Image: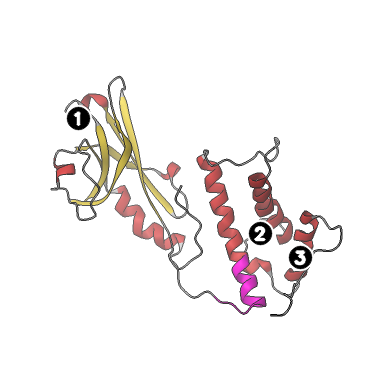
Amino acid sequence: MGQPQYKCPQQSKERERGWFCRALREVNQTVPLSRAYKAGGADVVTDIHNDIYDIRCRLFHAKGNKRSPRLVPQILSDRRLVAEGLDKLSRIFLLLASEFLNVRRTGGCVSYQGFALMSERLMSDSTVLICADDMALDTSATLKSPPFLDAIPMLTRGAPELSRPGLTSVLGSVAATALQGLQKISQFGLAHDGHLIMSGAVETDLIHDGIDRIEAQMSVQLRNAKQPKKLFKT
């Protein structure tokens, strides 16, 4: 095998940050990066640097600062930021691989608008259910299955404040006084038009003694199987 060919090799004593920006600027002259990255300002390279490279630094550097605090997996907003950055980086990578390596990724995808049309009406007209049966989750379960025969419906509404492009959420709430017949809470379900459309179990049974109200968020998230993976099990 021959030696690998580099499009924009790192120069002697060139720092990584400078190399990153220089390489992007050279590439951008022949392959507009705007084809893969929607810039918010006039300079797409600066935007990519401030967005994606900043995430890289906040992930790999143990110490942060007030301007760029480190990212940690225990904070949901940090995990969301990393997933969004990975999605943007994947688009740039696929563009460059297609142009310079003649590698193309085939497949299709559902757009955010298409997903919203499919999910928002369904979710907003649904009801969150709460039940105590700790039977194993079953994809063939219905509202007549044991976990949901005695389920208690929660007051449910669409939750745009908990949603974002590619994620549609509803929020259910119920006063603890309505749960006196349940000794514990093991599962939640979502019903629509007399059908169970999704369910989920909690890791540890919940006890509702000493609380006034319980709220439960249920969401459906868009995952295009033919696109680069950006969400991983933890």
> Which stretch is magenta?
93-104
Q: CA distance from mark 3 to mark 2?
A: 17 Å
Mark 1 or mark 3, earlier in chain: 3
Dots 2 and 1: beta carbons under 8 Å?
no
Residue 174 placement: quadrant: top left
Residue 168 location, x and y as percent? 39, 50
The local secondary structure at tag 2 comes to: loop
**Residue that label 2 marks:** 39
Q: CA distance from mark 2 to mark 1?
A: 52 Å
Q: Position of residue 187 (x, y in %)?
A: 26, 40
Query: Tag 3's secondary structure?
Result: helix
Image coordinates for residue 151, horizontal then vertical, percent: 18, 39
- Please say whether residue 43 is visible from this viewpoint: no
Q: What residue type is disc 3 on?
A: Ala
Residue at 42% across / 57% down in the picture? 222
Q: Residues within 10 Å of mark 2 (few under 14, many from 20)?
A: some
Please rate how many residues cluster around mark 1, counting C-alpha atoms within 10 Å: few if below 14, some from 14 to 19, many from 20: some
Find residue 12 and report its image quarter.
bottom right
Tell whether 12 sits left or right of 81.
Answer: right
Query: Image check: 109 left or right of 122?
Result: right
Q: Which mark is residue 124?
A: none
Amino acid under disc 2: Ala
- At 40% from the left and 60% from the top, the residue drawn is 115
The residue under label 1 is 182
Q: Is residue 168 left or right of residue 55?
A: left
For the N terminus, which image quadrant? bottom right
SS for callout 1: loop
Residue depth check, mark 2 versus mark 1: number of the one nearer the observer: 1
In terms of sequence position, does the residue under pointer 3 or pointer 2 come before the other?
3
Residue type of the residue flagged with mark 1:
Leu
> Which of the two residues, 149 or 229, is positioned nearer the viewer here?
229
**Location of mark 3 (residue):** 23
